[in-house]
Image (tube, rainbow, N blue to C red):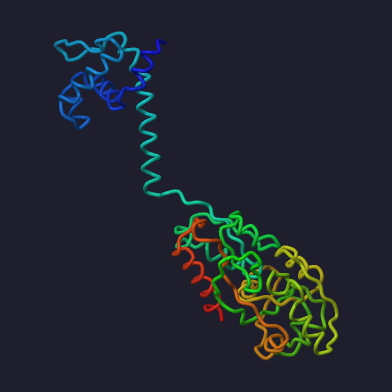
Amino acid sequence: MDTQVIKKISELDVFCLLVFKTIYETGYANLAAKALGVSAPKVSRCLTSLRNTFDDELFYRRQQGLKPTPLAEQLYQPICQFSDTIDQIESVAQQTKRNPLKPVLNVAVSPSIITSLAMSLSLPEFFNHFGPLRLHPWQNDTEEKIHKGEIDFGIGFDEQNQHGLNVTPIIEVSSLYVVANKDHPIWQCPSPISIEDIAEFDYVYLKCHGYNHRIDPLELYCQESGHFLTNIEYVSGLDDWYWHLMTMGSVSLTIMPEGLIANDIPRVCSQPLPTKELNKLKKVMNFPVYCFFEGDEQYRRYSEESKRIIITLINKLFLTVS
């Protein structure tokens, strides 16, 4: 094709092509103007522009209206296809305007609360606000990833933060749950269950950075009180924790509200650790505070409102089940 023709076509107004299509289908310029919601002179100007671009009359007058020339007959289908494409583009643009695309945020969460937080975030009121959220269990390199922007923000414990991140305290760990297989003999112990009762059985804990990544409070209590601890192991993942409870005959202590959720896991039972027993552990180890970890403001892909919603939600997780 001649380069001059290509240049002319590329400079052609899209609306002119819609005028061509409408005149072709109605046979009248005035009907085309009415259908497109414009004045007759504007349609006339578009038709002149089309004729100059294609160097053809395109339509000639007859008693029955405007009739297409042979070239116009050939142009009709391609212009129809182009018009359909424009309609699709408009539809996508309108849909995006109604439902603007939201970035998929990457959020690191301590394994001790990740299940309950995920369940809450799946509720329509939160899903509609955030859109999809990709949760990651907190790991050794999570702070570095937040610092680099690979993770948008994190929910972890206050004893972390080696990378100068911005930290907002949320809520202190204030209760624990005893968790074991439903048929475990610990449930036969006289109520209330004590720390000493738990120490009589194999014990497993979910290692969480900033809380028990060095030593679990139960182990520390047994060391300092001189109480014998039968056996202790740790796991790093929730699946491993569950399997250990099922197949190793172990007992565990977990943070509320995850402990409450444990009752909904098949073959698992949980009970709150009595306050008296909890205080024994608090005497040997300060219980941590859940915090919101984030990078500097200019790098954030979420709003202050989103941060506030997350913090409020975590507070409610503890308050509603306490």
The residue closer to the viewer here, 177 or 301, is: 301
The residue closer to the viewer here, 276 or 163, is: 163
Quarter holding residue 94:
top left
Residue 169, how many percent across, how many down? 55, 74
Q: Quadrant of the N terminus?
A: top left
Q: In the figure, is residue 268 to the left or right of 63? A: right
Instruction: Say if 175 sits above or below 154 in the image.
Output: below
The residue closer to the viewer here, 196 or 159, is: 159
Quarter holding residue 20:
top left
The residue at 40%/45% (across/down) is 96
Q: In the figure, is residue 132 to the left or right of 78? A: right
Residue farthest to the front? Answer: 164
Number of labelled discs?
0
Residue 197, how many percent across, how many down? 78, 86
The residue at 73%/86% (across/down) is 284
Quarter holding residue 143:
bottom right
Q: In the figure, is residue 175 to the left or right of 7? A: right
Residue 145, how many percent across, how many down? 63, 57
The residue at 74%/71% (across/down) is 213
Residue farthest to the top? Answer: 70
The residue at 71%/83% (across/down) is 285
Residue 322, how many percent across, how many down? 56, 81
Instruction: Say if 57 sits above or below 79 in the image.
Output: above
